[in-house]
Amino acid sequence: MRIAVFGAGGVGGYFGGRLAQAGADVLFIARGKNLQALQKNGLKVDSINGDFIVQPIKAHDDPAVIGEVDVVLVSVKSWQIPEVAQSLGPLVGSDTIIVPLLNGIEAPAQFADALGAEHIVGGLCGLISYIVKPGYVCHAGADPFINFGELDNRVTERVKNLRDIFLNTIGVKATIPKDIQVAMWSKFLLIASWSGVGSVTRATVGEFLAVPQTRQLLTDAMQEIYNLAHALGVALPEDIVRKSVAFVDKLPPSVTASMQRDIMEGNRSELESQSGAVVRLGIKAGIETPINNFIYHSLLPQEFKNIDNSLDIAK
């Protein structure tokens, strides 16, 4: 099975690296300094589950050089989806599956519109990781997991084959959920709320949880997403908000969400696909989301400024 990893950052670098470490035929698609470092020095991963290096490594910037593959793991920022979807064509054969590993909830539909619904499966993952420098990823916390499944919840050979490959890796738990929509929305409820509250407060997890008012803000944001999911026919469990807050409570108190870090560092963020998605889908479903509306609109001026700055730098 040939597996292409589109985006060799904290997520793609870790999961793709573990697959390559286990002997899978993995091809990384990267750009710029990250690509140069991968081609020259291989991929270095520091992990709480054991450090490792993949060298030599197969890394390119042109999907046409790679050609058709069996699986594409996509781990880019959600705002890059339109560009990435257009560039995936050379990788996609008649039986190729595309697994989005993004923080938003709309990625499968976006890729389906561009490449055909028959190629798309639902996916999500979890770990605390980041790029130390080009070609060097650090997995700093949480036990890494990856979940994927057909959007209609059929257990097909293609998803079972991908799961079996992951079962041979070290430091990855791979699962085919009974309901992939519930799994994706469960993560979305967690990450969109955490990202939003962290971004508005500019505080670490430990800092905003220690203040009763902002702790309640997190809980209320989660409750709105729970209500939205049920309105859209996604049967999230009744205790999901309590369990999600408990999960955040167990995180290292110094951590921040990636959306928050991007906003604070002046980079374009995933605001539109997280808080913005809650607002858009809430309007569509007729569900009020005042907390997420407040978070989204409060962060928009900074997001617009960061986008404008990034466009100026690119010129």
Image (cartoon, helix red, strand yellow):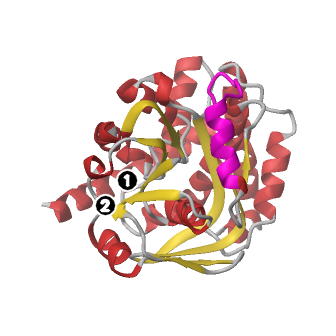
Instruction: Report the residue at 56% width, 65% height from top.
Output: 14
Q: Work out whether residue 164 or residue 132 is closer to the camera in this orientation and state it.
A: 164
| 125, above or below 21, in the image | above
State the separation of the CA atoms marked 1 and 2: 31 Å
Instruction: Report the residue at 56% width, 36% height from top.
Output: 105
- Residue 227, horizontal then vertical, whole percent: 72, 28
Q: Work out whether residue 196 or residue 153 is closer to the camera in this orientation and state it.
A: 153
Q: Which residue is mark 2?
A: 60
Q: Amino acid at mark 1?
A: Glu
Q: Is residue 80 left or right of residue 95?
A: left
Magenta segment, which residues?
148-166
Instruction: Report the residue at 54% width, 38% height from top.
Output: 293
Callout 1 secondary element: helix
Q: Do we see residue 184 in this rendering?
A: no
Please report contact status of discs 1 and 2: CB closer than 8 Å, yes or no. no
Q: Amino acid at mark 2?
A: His
Tag 2 or tag 1, which sits nearer the N-term? Answer: 2
Dot in front, 1 or 2: 2
| 171, above or below 220, in the image | below
The C terminus lies in quadrant: bottom left
Q: Work out whether residue 252 or residue 90 is closer to the camera in this orientation and state it.
A: 90
Q: Is residue 95 magenta?
A: no
Q: Which residue is mark 1?
A: 303
